[in-house]
Image: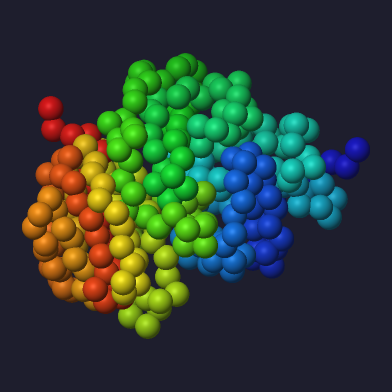
Amino acid sequence: MTALRIAEFDPADTEALVRMWRASFELGVGVKDFHPIQEQVRYLRETLQPAYRLRVAWEGDALAGFLASNEESVAQLHVRVERIGHGIGTRLLALAKAESSGSLWLYTFAQNTRARRFYERAGFVAIEEGFEPMWQLPDVKYRWVRGGRPDQPARTEDIGADAHPWLPTTPKRILTAMAMPHAAPGQVVDVGPLGVELKREATVALFKGDDLEVMRVVLQAGKSLPPHKVPGEITIHCLEGVVDITSETTSHVLRAGQMLYLRGHALHSVTALQDCSALVTIALRPRE
């Protein structure tokens, strides 16, 4: 048996790592990711690597696993499909625990039953159930505390079946990053206009906390999102282009620099009058 070696991530291994990561994700969640590999490579370099420490598990010359973590959370933990069940994930998770501040949180998709069993055996407790808008799938937030169970009870978020469909559902427009972590606390995120890159970019969720979710929505001219609503309040801040927000029977045309506020449960539709991007903020917990 080849000994397992855990090393710091080497950028020379980026594409091989991303392909292993993608295969593991597809198997666990039961979906097919149709995005170009280079989108995921760019996400690793520009978003994941600055915020997390990346380690790679090797068996001889074969890449066997991947961990992205910091003192507070596990952003990614994936094992090569052929090596699942051989203790590699356990070794990587133990490393994340040892380097943590005493607790860790992470998200996984509700339908990834293998991952859920793995984390629960490792002492993680489900503390929240939510909804991941990019993949349009329910997710679960887990927490681990050194020496005991988390003191926060499990609860269901108030987004449920009314999950915000701000994000395109055509597979090629669902950004690979939604299988990936949101921005970490304290991380600076660029939300400026995309300019000439606008036609090549897709909608992306920037972060999701206990009470707030923020995403940058990208729509090409003529594209629209059907009428929908969310329980919590939302704001739509047009960053560039022109977008029409029709709430009930009132049309609001937003141009760059303009923002619209909507109350919870306000039915609204969205149409891009020009290629546009907008910063959308969603309150996950409606007012009581």
Residue, far left? 250
Residue, far bottom? 196
Residue 31 rendering spot, x and y as whole percentages: 60, 46
Residue 107 rendering spot, x and y as whole percentages: 47, 37
- 7 and 227: which one is in front? 227
Residue 271 rendering spot, x and y as whole percentages: 25, 65
Q: Identify the residue at image location x=82%, y=47%.
A: 59
Residue, far right? 1
Count numbered badges in the picture.
0
Looking at the image, residue 35 sits to the left or right of residue 232; the answer is right
Which quarter of the picture shows residue 117? top right
Looking at the image, residue 45 sits to the left or right of residue 273; the answer is right
Quadrant in which the N terminus is drawn: top right
Quadrant in which the C terminus is drawn: top left
Residue 71 rendering spot, x and y as whole percentages: 46, 41
Task: Decide if residue 105 is in sight here.
Answer: no
Which quarter of the picture shows residue 199? bottom left
Task: Decide if residue 123 is in sight here.
Answer: yes
Q: Identify the residue at image location x=55%, y=33%.
A: 111
- 95 and 76: which one is in front? 76
Looking at the image, residue 116 sits to the left or right of residue 277; the answer is right
Looking at the image, residue 71 sits to the left or right of residue 235; the answer is right
Tell me, what colour scheme is on the image? rainbow
As drawn, 230 above or below 53: above
Q: Identify the residue at image location x=68%, y=50%.
A: 23
